[in-house]
Amino acid sequence: MKPRILLTGKNGQVGLELQRFLPQLGEVLAFDRQELDLSKPDDLRRMIRTVRPNLIVNAAAYTAVDQAEKEEAVARSINADAPAVMAEEAKKIGAGLVHYSTDYVFDGSKNSPYKETDPTGPLNVYGKTKLMGEQAIFEAGVPHLIFRTAWVYATRGRNFLLTILRLATQGREELRIVSDQIGAPTWSRAIAFAATQILTQIYGRGDGLAVLTEVSGVYHMTSAGETTWYGFAKAILEDVSQMRQSAPWFAAATGGRPLVAPRVIPISTEEYPTPARRPAYSLLSNSHLTETFGVQLPAWRTQLRSAFSDESATVLRE
């Protein structure tokens, strides 16, 4: 029997892509912020009890990293309290839970990829509240998968890719981009595709909840390879030539204006101060994910080229 899936954050970067793939697994009931406000726990409980899903996939989050420094209570309600409610309710009805977290649970002081077992130490409110959400799920004792990802971008919403494309239409001679933060840009579609692969393995083997219980835990899910924000910006401007510029998302990102590639100038984090501190090193080791499920995301540059070359392209393992 195919599972009934309750998906939150359906219009977010990952949630939108999950709607592309999750119907292969089961019946999907998807909600956006207007339909299901995660800052209202009573509404959330009521919805879960009404839908009675076999699986909750929480792709919603408060992701305004700098704004969270001023709105800690709001960030906590969505990133920590809501996952706690989902975990409690899922436990009561015998459902599983999938939740997305972040590299920002770490302080970035390592110089080798973070493993799931490494000590956490968030530098900002966003990372702190996301870690609280992870801990609440674990403490609830519900069968779960927590996928930590990083440097997520998409062809919709607000993200680094779309920002660079927009800036490249403004006639600027140069863009000053931080070059001393290291990470792996990860396409939201690759995340959704990999998660669906994993869930298909789990729920395609009879008692999905029992299998999910066996593999419950935290898994890192990011692109292979590494770069900096400076390197990512340069790659975007180099690879954009592969883009079919009449594609609706591209036209929306650029306002239909021509791109004039500016010079990209590397700068330090100190030269670009922000309200929230960012980790200098955000690489995550994906070995646990690959060893457990045989799933590996492509290199970050491969994903970027896929996003540009064909918006409907299927993400395949390299």
Image (spheres, rainbow, N blue to C red):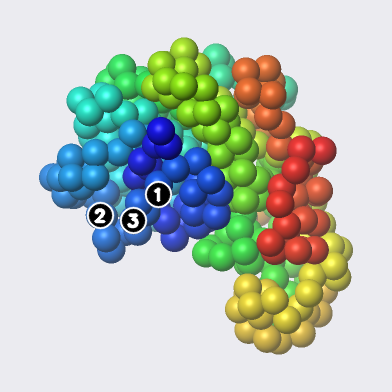
Amino acid type at mark 1 = Val
What is the CA distance from the residue labelled 2 to the residue labelled 3? 9 Å
Q: Dot 2: what SS?
A: loop
Q: Residue 36, how many percent across, how many down?
A: 26, 55
**Residue at the location (37% across, 54% down)?**
30
Q: Real-space Cα distance between discs 1 and 3?
A: 10 Å
Q: Looking at the rendering, which quadrant does residue 79 occupy?
A: top left
Is 49 positioned to the left or the right of 86 in the image? left
Q: What residue type is labelled 2?
A: Asp
Q: Name the residue under label 3.
A: 31
Please name the residue shown 22% across and 28% down the image. Answer: 93
**Image vertical order of residue 26 relative to residue 304, above or below:** above
Question: Which residue is tagged 1?
Answer: 28
Label 3: few (<14), some or many (≥20) within 10 Å? Answer: some
Q: Is residue 199 left or right of residue 76?
A: right
Q: Position of residue 188 (x, y in %)?
A: 60, 50
| Rendering coords of residue 64 (x, y %) | 43, 54
Q: Distance between the residues labelled 1 and 2?
A: 18 Å
Q: Are marks 1 and 3 in contact (CB under 8 Å)?
A: no
Q: Can residue 44 be seen in this view?
A: no
Q: Residue 98, percent across and down? A: 43, 34
Residue 237 numbered tag:
none
SS at circle 3: strand
Disc 2 marks which residue? Answer: 37
The answer to which of marks 1 and 2 sits earlier in the sequence is 1
The answer to whether residue 34 is above or below residue 76 is below
From the image, state whether disc 1 or disc 3 is nearer to you: 1
